[in-house]
Image (cartoon, rainbow, N blue to C red):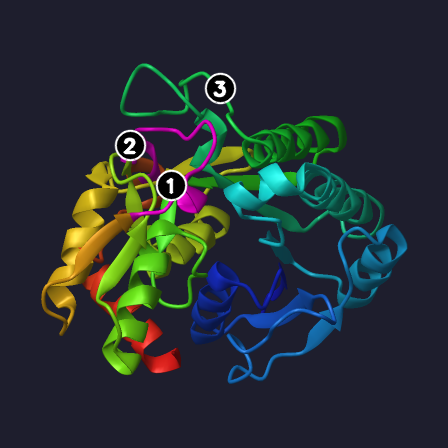
Amino acid sequence: MKKCLVTGAGGFAASHLIDLLLKGQYEVVGLTRIRDDLSNIKHLNIPLEYCDILDKFGVESIIKKVKPDIIFHLAAQSFVGMSWDFPELTLQTNIIGTLNLLEAIRKYSPECIFHLSSSSQIYGKVKNFPMTLDTPFNPQSPYDVSKLAQEMLVRQYSDSFGLDVRITRAFNITGPKRYPQFAETNFAQQIAKLEKYGGDPVIKVGNLESSRDYIDVRDAVKGYLLSVEVGRSKGIYLLCSGIATKIKDILNMMISFSTLDNIKIEEDKNLMRPNDTSYMVGDNSKSFDELGWKNQISLKETLRDLLNYYRSIV
């Protein structure tokens, strides 16, 4: 039985990945910080190691102790908006934290497979669509820059030290347990609260004209796993649906699931991002050809499950 170390174990995508790994008969160890919310994985009963990935010596100690066969690196400062408020923290966590892991692997576990969960945000504003592996990068936020630097660092360590690395570059992952800092999750949270507590049926929104390529988190984590099970060393795989959906259409779909009548929409400037990317859509043909991966869960099902999740927790 192969042993997997999952960083950021209590997070949104990590919790779904751990659930998938346990069903696949993998041994799983989670890496998390003491202060992190672990409610997403409390039912999974896996061993946990506590360490901030910025703690170089702590990371080395855990890699020596666990001796993982596979590392899924999902720990990150993953909020684009927050990266404008805390750019230094974003760069430190995402770049230096990844460096600490790579150094520990190089020294103490050089045979393990290292998977990096990257992001389509590294593309930023581009002119030609769909985005492919050949699309030039034009990052638009400190978060975007940090994820691009992560990828370059991982590839450099593979070239220089022979580490076996796999990179998945996911587009807009959503679904149950996603944090409310994102457009569709914010809509779901607002609707669920209005349904439960009442009040003036107003949903506050940011930019509704942007288009995104959404995939369900349960599909995304299957892509993570396939990248290490059947992917190739240094392989980079785009996880996307190939369909661009306007945020306005996401909102309308969410409203159609609601029990509320006469919902009003109100623009909130606080929900606007500086220098926001207006359109994103990817090409998943290589991921299908090499991994056999394709998104299976419809956006409608994903959004319905997301709203039901927020109904269960508000």
Residue numbers of the magenta segment? 267-287
- Ranked by sequence position, the earlier of labels 3 and 1 is 3
Q: Amino acid at mark 3?
A: Asn
Q: Residues within 10 Å of mark 2 (few under 14, many from 20)?
A: many
Q: Residues within 10 Å of mark 3 (few under 14, many from 20)?
A: some
Please tell me in which quadrant of the rendered image residue 187 appears: bottom left
Please tell me in which quadrant of the rendered image residue 8 appears: bottom right
As measured in the structure, the alpha-carbon distance from the residue carrying label 2 to the one carrying label 3 is 15 Å
* Mark sitting on residue 281: 2
As measured in the structure, the alpha-carbon distance from the residue carrying label 3 to the one carrying label 1 is 15 Å
Contact between marks 1 and 2 (CB within 8 A): the answer is: yes
Q: Residue furthest right?
A: 57
**Total marks drawn?**
3
Q: Amino acid at mark 2?
A: Val
Q: Position of residue 37 (x, y in %)?
A: 61, 72
Q: Position of residue 82 (x, y in %)?
A: 58, 45
The residue labelled by disc 3 is 138
Classify the position of the C terminus by image quarter.
Answer: bottom left
